[in-house]
Amino acid sequence: MKLPGTPLHHAGGNYLLVEGGYSHDTRTITLLAEPDNGPFEHPERARRITWGEQGEWYPISQWAVGMISLQEEAYGEQRALIDEIFERFRVEQRDLRPVAWAVQGHGGFLGSLETILPMGLAVTLYDDEETAAEESGADEVVPITNLPNFLTHLAREGYAGAMWNGRQPVFFCIDDADEVQFLRVQRSDAGGVAMEILDADGAWNGYEGAEQIEMLDNAERCDARLVETLGMQPVLDWPDHGTFYGVGPRGGHAGLVQLEEDGPEYAVLFVDEDAAGDWRDEVEPGWNVFEVEELSTFLGSEELEGRGALLNPGAHRARQGVLWSDGERVILDSFSGFWTLEDDEFEPVEE
């Protein structure tokens, strides 16, 4: 989401000031000048940038927590003017008040693995500071002053979404213009579902589907964030007992399903019998659930020749994977990469 800048006319020149960062400690203000601005002579190497519908500008300077940097040395001749513009902007805009609180721990913002946000880690956002401070593992409570910038930062850092007060999911989406959008879902007063979309000013507005958006595909970054958070492990909830549950038209025989039209066929495997039954009831009510004790034998069966098995379809990405046999070993493709399974021990496959 590219936030609009604030136009400012000062000392005969037109400027655009763009807020960056998401908290007092990360806040930046970028100063841009119009191309024919008299006080600033732009060197030939200087490049113009287009800022949305607000036209073309030259970047002049950036303010960051009291420090000012210049885009070009030549602009230093106008340092007094630059200081005046930044000071006037900060006075007129005033310090932003926190709109939410997040919790920072070891390696990033703390969150949870939510099935409703299955691609990765969902950061928890709080309405009040006290509740955030009670979060286990908290190193620092971060007051969020710019919500659109913060959620954009989370998407760039490989987070899969957010959970508002642990109850309302915030989905990361993308619109027809390839701009990131944020959709919050909650229960309505009538008992249904109410959806809100975040605007550039940080306000939540009712969303009826008029603006076409779809979920952001950020799988590679989400996987990297999961590895950083969970450590280098093959998959969560791998059964110590070695028993899996398959679903098929006949007991002991794998059924094949397609995730996408004209896509490859897979068998399905679950680590939990109830989850296998729930999947069967929803997708293939006429099939059976059966135990799989010898994984390599199951994956090497005639039905699965040249095919693999989906592990825990419908579960969170950290608990999912694709399994197959190369004739000698079991191979797992998961959020942390490729692994081989021999004698009940996983070994990562080197790149």
Image (cartoon, helix red, strand yellow):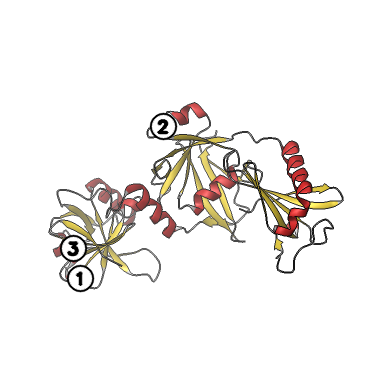
Q: Amino acid at mark 3?
A: His
Q: Nearer the viewer, residue 78 or 180?
A: 78
In which quarter of the view is residue 294 placed? bottom left
| Rendered location of residue 252, percent (x, y) | 16, 60
Quarter in which the C terminus is drawn: bottom left
Helix or strand or loop: what does disc 3 sit on? loop
Question: Residue 146, relative to residue 59: is it above or below?
Answer: above
Decide if residue 127 is in sight here.
yes
Disc 2: CA contacts within 10 A as few (<14), some (14-19) or many (>=20): some
Disc 1: CA contacts within 10 A as few (<14), some (14-19) or many (>=20): few
Q: Nearer the viewer, mark 2 or mark 1?
A: 2
**Residue under label 3:** 253
The label number, if any, that marks residue 295 in the structure image: none
**Residue under label 1:** 326
Please state if 286 lies on the left or on the right of 24 as rendered: left
The label number, if any, that marks residue 135 in the structure image: 2
Q: Nearer the viewer, residue 304 or 282?
A: 304
Q: Amino acid at mark 2?
A: Glu
